[in-house]
Image: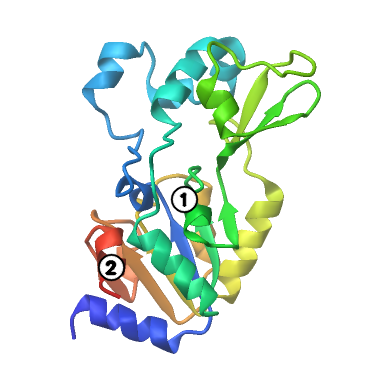
Amino acid sequence: MDAVEKLKEMIEKSSNIVFFGGAGVSTESGIPDFRSVDGLYHQQWDYPPETILSHSFFMQKPEEFYRFYRAKMLCSTAKPNMAHKKLAQLEQEGKLKAVITQNIDNLHQMAGSKRVLELHGSVYRNHCMKCGAFYGFDTVKKSEGIPRCEKCGGMIKPDVVLYEEALDSRVLSEAVSAIEKAQTLIIGGTSLSVYPAASLLDYFRGEHLVVINRDKTSRDRIADLVINEAIGEVFSKI
């Protein structure tokens, strides 16, 4: 039995599946992984992405932050791929209980998933730092310089967890609870190098641990099934 057939069998026999995903789930939708270094960084940016996407940089150099953020983090053309669509289908069938994602692109929701736990927030939510007014994706995407609140003039901040910021405690506790209860945990499109998100997997006590990622991960040795392929391609065969 090949790996995809094994995965299909595990899914068929499972009544409580949780999916934990990272950037690799979205790259097939055309969203670049900002950690993969391309020539653009060296041509356009004076700082590495991790520095620009930090809380202190946002506060000190908001205009430079937003120049990078609009160019590299706000992709309005991306559409859900087969991984997003299949996960939404599994949820509708009652098998998938939660999607836990490190992505901030809203693609799981666009595909129809209802219970999506966004560990690192979402580019589709933004708030005024002064009065708390809510702003959507387009407000920031279409703005120039530093986006300002229409009501009070305060600076608008994305609801995205920047470096140096803590993860949302409510989302974290929900993610831990979902993983603890899962019968099958599928990890997809992540190198598991980002903490504290990756440490959530320590709470899994279920039957089947599956890793689907192009490259090796730190959990491969304890997984019941490892598939080193693009996750969208794998889910298109299920």
Name the residue: 48% across, 43% down. 105
Provide the secondary structure element on which disc 1 rests: helix
Q: Which quadrant is home to the N terminus?
A: bottom left
Q: Tag 2: Cα neighbours inside 10 Å, few (<14), some, or many (≥20)?
A: few
Seen from the viewer's position, the closer of residues 228 and 200 is 228
Note whether 147 is above or below 91 in the view shown: above
Q: State which quadrant residue 231 falls in.
A: bottom left
Note whether 224 is above or below 213 in the view shown: below
Would you say residue 160 is visible in this rendering?
A: yes
Q: Position of residue 185 (x, y in %)?
A: 45, 71
Seen from the viewer's position, the closer of residues 128 and 2 is 128
Q: Which mark is residue 116?
A: none
C-alpha distance separating marks 2 and 1 = 17 Å
Q: Position of residue 97 (x, y in %)?
A: 57, 72
Q: Position of residue 111 (x, y in %)?
A: 47, 58
Q: State which quadrant residue 35 falls in.
A: top left
Name the residue: 72% across, 24% down. 128
Instruction: Give amino acid for label 1.
Output: Leu
Name the residue: 32% across, 45% down. 27
State the residue position of label 2. Answer: 236
Label 2 with label 1: CB-CB less than 8 Å: no
Q: Position of residue 124 (x, y in %)?
A: 57, 38
Instruction: Give amino acid for label 2.
Output: Ser
Would you say residue 199 is visible in this rendering?
A: no
Q: Which quadrant is home to the C terminus?
A: bottom left
**N-terminal-most mark, 2 or 1:** 1
Extreme-left residue of the structure: 2
**Color encoding of the figure:** rainbow
State the residue position of label 1. Answer: 107
Extreme-bottom residue of the structure: 13
Q: Is 171 left, or right, of 130 in this rendering?
A: left
